[in-house]
Structures are given as structure tokens and as C-alpha cells.
Image (tube, rainbow, N blue to C red):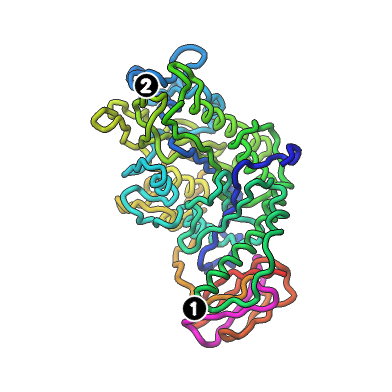
Amino acid sequence: MKRRNFIKLTTTASAVSLFPAQITNALNIGKKFINCDISNRKLVLIYLGGGNDGLNTLVPLNQYDLYSNLRPTIKVSDTGANSFINLDTTLDDTQQIGLHPSLTGFKNLYDSGFLRILQAVGYPSQNKSHFASTDVYNTGNDGNSWDNGGDSGWIGRFIESYYYDLVQQSFPIGVEIGSKTGSLGFHGAEEHGLSINIEGQDTSGFYSVLSGLGGEPPTYIPNSHYGEELQYIIDNDQISTLYSEAISNSFNNGSNSVTYEDSDLSNQLKTVARLISGGLESKVYLVKLNGFDTHFSQVQSAGDLQGDHNNLLTELNNAISSFMDDIIAQGFQDDVVGLTFSEFGRKAKENGNLGTDHGEIAPMFVFGTAINGGVSGTNPDLTEASENNNWQLETFQFDYRETLGTLLQDYLGADDFALDSTFYNHTNNESFSQNKISELVRDEYSVEENCYSNTLTDHRLDKKIFRISPNPFQNEIKVTSHEFENEFLFEIYDLNGRKIKSGLSYTHKPIQIENIMNGIYLIKIKFQNREEVHRIIKSS
């Protein structure tokens, strides 16, 4: 893309939208918060792909001699121009941290009170496979089982249980940037997420590029498994077109107020800031910085700061610093909280190849003006690492779900039902609503319990028995079912809750819906003292 058009992503950006399989209360749009307006709040997740080395990111100063013995070649120096940055001399001795010297922006965020560092984050049965551990983080599990769902993601379940009423015409609930494939984290329990790939295209031209793909959908959809699969593909295509327009419009209407460096992560966060600035109402953003699997060349040579890890942390530092400067300058900083995470950490002992091998625990950084700055936890106990346990630091102080659960409830306002639907501690049979990090969110931004949303507490996502076809439709739809062959009442609403049509119909009989604008509507089917709500799409 031309430089004046702001950015050309070198990797894929995806817009992800998930809809629950059933939306009983979807017509109550806009009524979730009463005198507790937190509807503009957003979460930005930054995935450090490959397993970030926590010990060189946060040097444990109370054990510096032991740290140096474990890492005589790759250690961060305590003297000279490339020595660590002393984070905070007022902390307890067990919390004395030396920031990697590349993290000058993190130091500024900490001094401003906008950064909280979480030490030794992990989960009960840590897996040191990139693929398995990434799946654990994406699905919200603990390494002991897949009780939270092995084929659905925690973000998807959260959206289904919490943002169930955001069936909006114009925006995806989640946006993913920086990966050619959609994250498992966005897959819902009832339906997989909709992923839109725009690799090689600029965000401003997203709609014009995407809307030119493909032809008209088939006019006949068979009442069969094949028909259901075909309908799913058609739905995805139509939703993609609708949402791509919103993304392009938001990008073109938005702006950036600071200069970002020309790096992959900076470009991703620059895009996020511009989309939010342009009015995109998406709630969860996921960006990615790869390369942290530093088995080799973590540093260039003994005692040398330069190397892959320094380059990665420099990119991370500069991208987050610019992003924070940008959103503060534009005035929506209170509505955005960011978090870094990695699938695991590295061993305490260097490996002899100027690098480190797969470990377990790793730190998290949570940032934003709504975050209560400081340090949670203490430095990892380096005496735990020995030849007997393959130089591993195994004791985690915070389950990664504690951090996420705290933000979902105390910052985004989810109630216990939504939180437990997202992830639950099946090992201890305990809700994460009872095990939060109390100091994470500033008191003035922490959502009071009486403001928690009224989610689907009394509703279960039962299997639907009706199918709507064609969907998208032009002038008519048919309601069909293998389980119900009789008359039913129906009501059709727009997304503002206005009833546009109602009546009595029969399965397989066409329902005429003419003279309405293109977009998303809801049809409520009433039968046998039950109700079922479907999303329908009017297209030309």
C-alpha cells in the first residue's frame, strides 16, 4: 500500500464476529447497563508468540548472583550503558526488578501508574509444546483437562454469554490482526467465529476488495446437511461483506495522533487505535508479535545486549508506548486496557547456544489508565531450578485466567454467569469470580457489582429446531424443521427493537418480507409455549 494511505499490513488481519446460537433477550439492545455506562470499554490482547524469556525481561535483582551463574553468557548486565533499568527502589526486596534495558517506555508507563506487572503467570499443568500450550491459553483450560471445551475459545464463549445482545448491523465483536489464520480463541461454543482475511490489502480498501469477490448465492438451498453447510458458507460471505464495510469506514474516519515506527506490531496497534478512533465498536482486539522462541541468538555474543530478544522487546516497547501516547492524545484512553501474554516462559539456565529452551512461567504486563500500576507477586525463586528438574521454574503465582477473569468482570462488567461460561476452575471446582486480582483495576474504574450485566443467567443455548432459508434473503424466507410441522406465530424486528412484521405461518410456507432496507434483522418464532430467535439478513 502507498505510504500516504497509512499502512499496508505485511500479515493478515481478520475481523471476527461471533453470534450465539440463540438470543432470547436480543431485543433488549442497549439496556445492559443502567447508570453504569461502560459500553465503550475494549480489551486489547498482545500475544508474544514463541514463549517470552521472563528472566531477561524482568531480572530478579534480589538473586542477581544466582541469575548470573545460571546465565553467564546471556545475562543482562548490572553495569554499563546496557545494564538493566531499576524499576522501583521502593518495592520489597523480593520484588526488586531490573527491566530489560530496551523497556524504557514500560518504565515510563510504570512511573505514570499505568502499568501492572504480574510475576510468574502460568497454569496448573504446564505444557511446554507450543501448539498444546497455545491451545490451552486459547481455550481457557488448565492443562489437566479440556473441561472448558477443546474446540471452542474463551473469547468466543465470553462473547456468546456476555455480548449476546450485540447483534449489530455494522461491526464485528472481535478483531484479529497479525495472523494468517483465525485464532481458536474466537471460536464460540455454539458457532465458530467469522474470520475475514485481508492479507496484502490495506484497511481503507477492505470493503471494496472484499465486496468484489464471488457471485450471487444460489436461489435454492436444499433441506439437508449439505444445505445447512451451504447456508453457513453463504452466511459467512454476507456477514463478511457487511462487516468489511464497517471496518473500512472506521479506518477512513479514524486517525492517529502520534508517529509510530514502521514495525509489524506498531502497524497492528496503529491500526487498532485508528479503528477505535474511527468509531468501530468492536470489544476485543488480538494482535501478535512472533519470534520469542529464542533457542539461538538471543544475544549476539557473550555480554552483548544485541540479539533477537532485544530486538523483539524493543519492538514491543515502542509499539505499546506509541499506542498509549496515541489513545491518550485522542482522549479515549480510559476505554482501553491492554495485556501481553505468551504461551510459556523459558528455562532458568541458558542452553549453550546463546539462547534458552522451553520453560513454564512467564510475566504478564497489563497497561492502561484504568490499571492500578505496580507489581503483583514476587520474583521467581531461582533455587527451584536445578539439574533434577531440567532447570525449570515450575511454581506459578497467578493462573492466567485470574488476570483475564479480573479484567472481564472488574473492567468490562461481566457477571458471574458470563465469567463461568468463559472459563471455570474445574480442578478446584471454583469460579474465578472468587479468585480475582483485587489490585489490578483502579477503584474509580472498577465496575460495581450492581452494574454487572444481566446476562443469560436463566437461559441455556438450546439446540434450535428451525432453519431459515434462504438466508440472506431478498423478498421472502421459509421456516423449516424436521421436528415441528405445524403453524407458528412470528415477529420480525429490526436492531432498534421495532417490529416490522408479524403474523401466523406454517413450516415450509414462504413469508413475504418486502420493502425493507438491507441489513440484519431478528425473527422470533413462537410455538408450543416456546420461543426461538434467529438472525436473518436482507440483501439485494
Can you name the residue that lies furthest to the left here?
A: 388
Percent coordinates x, y for residue 533 in the rendering: 55, 72
Q: Residue at x 41, y 53 (%)?
A: 423
Amino acid type at image mark 2: Arg
Q: Residue at x 68, y 49 (%)?
A: 279
Percent coordinates x, y for residue 538 in the rendering: 68, 70
Percent coordinates x, y for residue 235 in the rendering: 60, 66
Can you name the residue that lies furthest to the top here?
A: 80
Task: Estimate how packed mark 2 is, as few (under 14), some (14 to 19) or many (20 or more) residues with alpha carbons within 10 Å.
Answer: many
The reply to whether dot 1 and dot 2 touch (C-beta < 8 Å) is no
Asked if residue 278 lies left or right of residue 156, the reply is: right
- Which residue in the protein does label 1 denote? 530
Q: Say above or below: 444 vs 231.
A: above
Q: Nearer the viewer, residue 252 or 411?
A: 252
Label number found at residue 71? 2
Q: Which residues are magenta?
A: 473-499
Q: Say above or below: 285 vs 112.
A: below
Percent coordinates x, y for residue 520 in the rendering: 65, 66
Mark 1 element type:
strand
Of the image marks 1 and 2, the number of the one nearer the N terminus: 2
Residue 495 in magenta? yes
Is any part of residue 433 visible from this angle?
no
Amino acid type at image mark 1: Arg
Q: Nearer the viewer, residue 20 or 480?
A: 480
Count of marks placed on residues: 2
Q: Residue at x 41, y 50 (%)?
A: 140
Q: Quadrant of the C terminus?
A: bottom right
Task: Estimate how packed mark 1 is, as few (under 14), some (14 to 19) or many (20 or more) residues with alpha carbons within 10 Å.
Answer: few
Asked if residue 63 lies left or right of residue 27, the reply is: left
Which image quadrant for residue 326?
A: top right
Q: Say above or below: 226 vs 178.
A: below
Q: Say above or below: 152 vs 434.
A: below
